Image (spheres, rainbow, N blue to C red):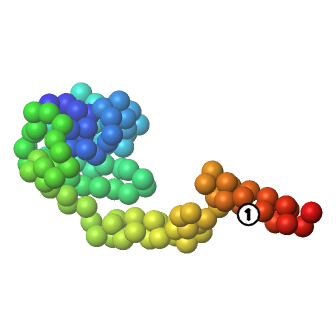
Amino acid sequence: MRIDKFLWCIRVYKTRAIATEECKKNRISLNENVVKPSKEVNSGEIYTIRKNQIDYKIQVIQIPTNRVGAKLVSLYCKDLTEPEQLELLQTRLSTQNYYRQKGIGRPTKKDRRDLESYTSDDLSEEN
């Protein structure tokens, strides 16, 4: 199986086209050597994937025949990502939430309707 299809099958990337693009951008490597999208995957190989400024390492256990469910991914690959990389990811996620919490910022349509009903009631009482 090709590396781009394998990465799509184990749900590293949402589409196969994205997986192919990442290979072309030299973000997938095997033993520090960049691989092409057509590289054949074999069991036991360890790939380094650069995604979201984090270096993930996965070891191929088995080759899937089709795209697998999220719960079955562990049957086909083993995550060997270093703990420092995972801590870096957690740090980045926490700093993003620090600056802007969910729900704060531009009001939704529902918020605007509530504001309009509130302000229109106040104007009718004043007149």
Residue 103 is left or right of residue 44, and the answer is right
- Across and down, in percent, residue 112 comes to 68, 55
The residue most toward the right is 127
Quadrant into which the C terminus falls: bottom right
Residue 94 is left or right of residue 124, and the answer is left
Q: Is residue 103 above or below residue 13?
A: below
**Residue 36 seen by the camera:** no
Point 20% across, 60% down: residue: 80
Label 1 element class: helix
Which residue bears the numbered disc 1? 118
Point 10% across, 38% down: residue: 64
Mark 1 residue type? Tyr
Quadrant into which the N terminus falls: top left
**Residue 68 seen by the camera:** yes
Instruction: Specify few, some or many for label 1: CA neighbours under 10 Å numbering under 14, 14-19, or 20 or more.
Output: few
- Across and down, in percent, residue 37 comes to 28, 30
- Across and down, in percent, residue 52 comes to 42, 53
